[in-house]
Structure formats: C-alpha cells, structure tokens
Image (spheres, rainbow, N blue to C red):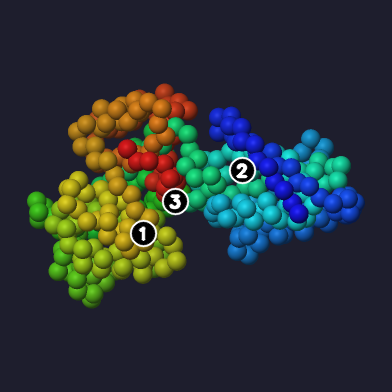
Amino acid sequence: MTKILYYPMKFGRIIIFTALAAYSFGDRIFAKSNLPEAMQDTAKQIESLWSEGLCETIMVRKKGNPLASIACNGNFGVAQRQKLLDILLKNFFTIKKESYKLRPKNGMYLYQTRYGNQTVYFKLYVRGALDLWPRNPVDGKQIAIYVQNVRASKDLVKWRTLGIPLTFGITFGRSDTHELMQQLSAYGDETWLSIPLEDDNIEIADGNLLNIADALDSERLAAYLGALGDEDQLHGVSPLYCSRFCKNVPALRALFAALRDHNKERELILLDADRHDDSSFYQTGRIMNFRTFRAYMAKNNFCPALSNFLSLKGENAARIMAVDAADETAFRCLHQFAQRQSDSIEFMRISEMSLTNPFR
C-alpha cells in the first residue's frame, strides 16, 4: 500500500510538495534495476495522458542525474496530474519534490524522484493549455489590447512598433480586408475580424454592415461571409457596431453558427466589444460554448482607465481594453507604459489570457 504525504510551501510562483512513498523490500530491489528502460516506459505512459502525436520526450541529465524531458500540447488539470503521480509511483519512482512555473498557457513541472539510491528527474512542459494545475496560477495583472477598426496597412505597422503583444481586429467587408488579413498572417499575428453589425446609430458603416434580416436568411448570410476564403481560418471575432443586432439572439446564434462552420476544427474566440448594457453578444456566445470575453471600451479615457486598473492593490486581475486604431491618445499612452512596464503587469494576446483570473 502506498501512502503519500504532501507538505505545501509557497515561494513566489513556485510551490513545492514533498511526497514520501512506502514500498516493500522486494519493490525496492526491483526499483534499482534497468533504470534507462524504466524511464523510457514511464515517459511513454506519461505521454499517453494526451492524444498520440502531442508529446515528445528526450533523455538528458540534470546535475549529473538522469532527466526525462517531456513536452506536450494540451491541458494539465487536476485529473491528469493525479494520473501522472500515479504513473511515477507505480514505476517505483519515489517522489521527493514537485515544483512548477506557469505562464498563462504554458507550464513547466519538475519532479525530483528516487529510483533505488539514484536521483532521477522528470520534467514536463505543457504548451498551448487553457487549464493548468493549479487553477488561477498567474500572479499580478494581465492586460490584452484589442486594436479594432484597422483601416490600412500603416495601422498594423504603427501599433506593432509598441513592442508589446497586441490583438488586431480587421474590419470585415472592406475592399482591402483580405489583404490586411494576409499581412497579419505574414507578421505571425492572429487573425481577428471586427464585423459591422446592424446598429441603431449607424446606417453606412466602414465595411459591409450585416443586418438582422440577412443574418436570419441562411443564403444571404452565406453570401455575406463569402468574402472569407477557405484558407481564412479565424482566431476570433468581435462586433464593430452592434447595438440593434446584439439585442437579437436568433440573429446572433445564426451568425455564430455560420462562423463556427467556416472555421471547422479551429477554436473561435468571441469578444464582446459592444458598449451597450443590453447586448446579448457575450451571453449568447457562452450559451453556445464559445470561449467568450468582454472588452473594456476605453473611448476617450484610455490612460485613466489603464492607470486605475494597474493601481488595484494586492489583486491578481485581468482586463481586455478595446481601442480604435485611429486613437492617437491611446497609442501615446501605451507607448509610455510599454517603456516602463514591470513584473506587475503582463501584456498578452486575448487568446493567451487565463480564464481563471478575475476580470476587472
């Protein structure tokens, strides 16, 4: 019978656990033999926690001791961690220490174990995760800047000179929409669309305004989205205008379903950038199982809003701020913050934000 005792000690972003396992004398004799083979078998079993082809293992050394370095794409939640610990113990690796370092979508877990009298390390890299053990891992403040209503190539170039991660919303329905999307792709940025939707105050939009009647007609909706080529896989979508459309749940559901079909297997993130309180954009996206965020609309008060967020004391918090590409005041403010950013704030893309941190 195996008994595990955990003693937590927290140091900054690293939490250490000590685990003691009791084995029979026969088990310990077995554990001393065939270490390379045991490490290979154990690594394969750990890889099996994810789908085939999502992991890669190399064998190296750490401080003169053998180390299996395993890199996997996907989540690492409570259940997977429990299975990993179980795999180590069943293969006669006594767990002495567990430590981790996390970023929003990436984690590194290091396990110091004993195999007989030999110290052996297992290092697990988790990449592209939406969930990492333990939940709410990010210390400090996260902020994503959504630059929407991009009207020209020069907008992309200008904002990228800030040197911080940004998410750009290309206005859909312009003659140069596809060209701007290709430019984003060439830069290695994510492709997001700001879609002009029927609004109480807008009749002639920058881009092609989608009205409710067309969204509820499958043929006309398909024709509207026909400007998207099969190769145009999207990372996210937000409304550019929306007050009337965003009150109509059937129209929103029709649009979201059509966009999901277009994107096929790729995840599509929705960003509610509508400033009206009665907008159903966010709730409809959540009900349809999209990963959905709300943006803080910082029209004419970007700097005070950013300063107030950063001044929150003793909180782990996240915020998405949407700005117009033509907002020169917001650009200058971000330029100043980017030059003096510290460990207390982390700029990132919307897709990288932790779902478990509270949004303020």
Quarter of the rendering occupied by the C terminus: top left
Quarter of the rendering occupied by the N terminus: bottom right
| Label 2: element kind | strand
Q: Which residue type does callout 1 highlight?
A: Phe
Q: Are marks 2 and 3 in contact (CB under 8 Å)?
A: no
> How busy is the neighbourhood of tag 3: few (under 14 within 10 Å), some, or many (20 plus)?
few
Q: Which mark is residue 108?
A: 2
Residue underneath mark 1: 290
Name the residue at 67% across, 58% down. Answer: 47
CA distance for labels 2 and 3: 30 Å
Above or below, 178 relative to 22? below
| Label 1: element kind | loop
Q: Which residue type does callout 3 highlight?
A: Ala
Q: Which residue type does callout 2 highlight?
A: Met
Residue 209 appears in view:
no
> How busy is the neighbourhood of tag 1: few (under 14 within 10 Å), some, or many (20 plus)?
some
CA distance for labels 2 and 1: 27 Å
Whichever of callouts 2 and 3 sits on the residue coming sooner in the sequence is: 2
Name the residue at 43% across, 45% down. Answer: 356
Seen as rendered, the residue at the extreme bottom is: 219
Residue 268 versus residue 178: which sits nearer the camera?
Answer: 268
Q: Which mark is residue 186?
A: 3
